[in-house]
Amino acid sequence: MAEVVDLYSMTKQELRDLCCSLGEKPYRGKQIFAWLYGGACSARDMTTLSKSFRETLAACTTMTLPTIAKKQVARDGTVKYAFRLVDGHVIESVVMSYHHGYTICVSTQVGCNMGCGFCASTVGGKARDLSAGEMIGQIMVAQRDLSCRIGNVVLMGMGEPLDNLEQVLKFMALANDPEGFSIGYRHFTLSTCGLCDKITILAKHNLPITLSVSVHSPFDEERSAMMPVNKKFPLAELAKTLLYYQGVTGRRVSLEYALIQNKNDSPAHAKALMELFSGLSYHVNVIPVNEARAGFSKSSREQVQQFVECFLSQGIPATTRRELGADISAACGQLRRQVQNEL
Ligand code: SAH
């Protein structure tokens, strides 16, 4: 028998092909897709299919969703989930409520190989990539649990999305599908630590998503010390790649900058960053570093404001990210570690 496939990882075309290979009409694929996103819990619920086909489908496919290992609700309404995957691995997702609706922060890998010094997700390295279906599952379970519609997706959870690009592209296509979650590409933000080769590939897909790049320092030596990826793709190459990306897609990019006290929060840093990315249209997203790892403390409110002002005074849009969920171990990777320690 063919390999058992998970239906949540399949596109409509793949479902059509599967139906044909099982001796059914291709349009059955579209029906299955509609059932997946319309609330079916198993192939046996798909009552527009013949009973015998439902049985066949149930026997040769799975429909696996993550289970909620732990859930925390912050006073501001932010909900953080530790999800357990089918093989026991634990990942995290966060749902935030903004005036324009619900946003989910999705994980793309179990752990991460990028090794950034301030990030909790990378401790212990990467166990494995997530499948597109496991990314869909995070939205599916959160929406059902909260009885809400999630309209925005940020790929900023655990993992490096561009280190799992194929599944991430598939996930976005599935979630974008009008019969999937119907989330427009403009409502996706993909965050990367700066894998230039993959940014170039992503550019060729020309999707109207927002690309967000974790910069955190405009100086190679300092950035390499915090982010090993910089040794492979130094800042000059990153800047050149982003210009290329913008030339192809026409999209403004977002630069993430975690402010670490007395390390990367000086006006000289802001100035060097503006020089580095001159010619690029971008928005700076300043985040006081989340104190998840030893040796990284957050800049004061005044320092944060001063840093933001450096950009605003030059006409460059810059904002401070609202710190949602501050009371619920909000830093990436923290809840997962708690759950793992309880096992
Ligand atoms: N791997 C991707 C996406 C996941 S991390 C990336 O590197 O962009 C999402 C964002 O959170 C990144 O900007 C990352 O640098 C940042 N981040 C990680 N740990 C953090 C911390 N302790 N404080 C503040 N931001 C952090």
Image (tube, grey):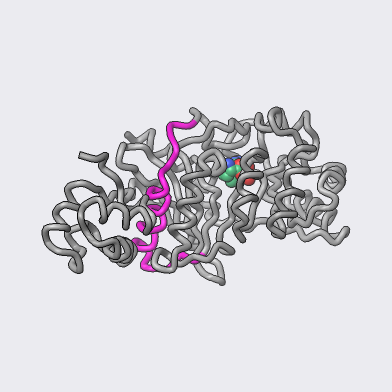
* Quarter of the image where ligand 1 sits: top right
Image height of 319 relative to 303, above or below: below
What residue sits 56% from the left and 63% below the top? 187
Magenta-colored stretch includes residue 134: yes
Q: Residue at x 78, y 57 (%)?
A: 281
The quadrant in which residue 293 appears is top right
- Report whether 199 appears left or right of 46: right
Residue drawn where x is 80% and y is 53% of the image: 280
Give, as a single range, the part of the protein colored magenta.
126-151
**Does residue 49 appear in the picture of this structure?**
yes
State the residue lying farthest toward the bottom.
99
Q: Position of residue 337 (x, y in %)?
A: 44, 36
Taking the image as drawn, is residue 39 in sight?
no
Q: Residue at x 78, y 43 (%)?
A: 240
- Give the percent coordinates (x, y) of residue 104: 49, 57
Front-most of 161 and 178? 178
Q: Quadrant of the N terminus?
A: top left
**Residue 263 falls left or right of residue 126:** right
Q: Residue furthest left?
A: 52
As displayed, is residue 301 above or below residue 276? Answer: below
* Quarter of the picture holding the C terminus: top left
**Camera-nearest residue between 276 and 217:** 276
Q: Position of residue 79 (x, y in %)?
A: 45, 57
Instruction: State the image quarter where residue 179 is shown.
Output: bottom left
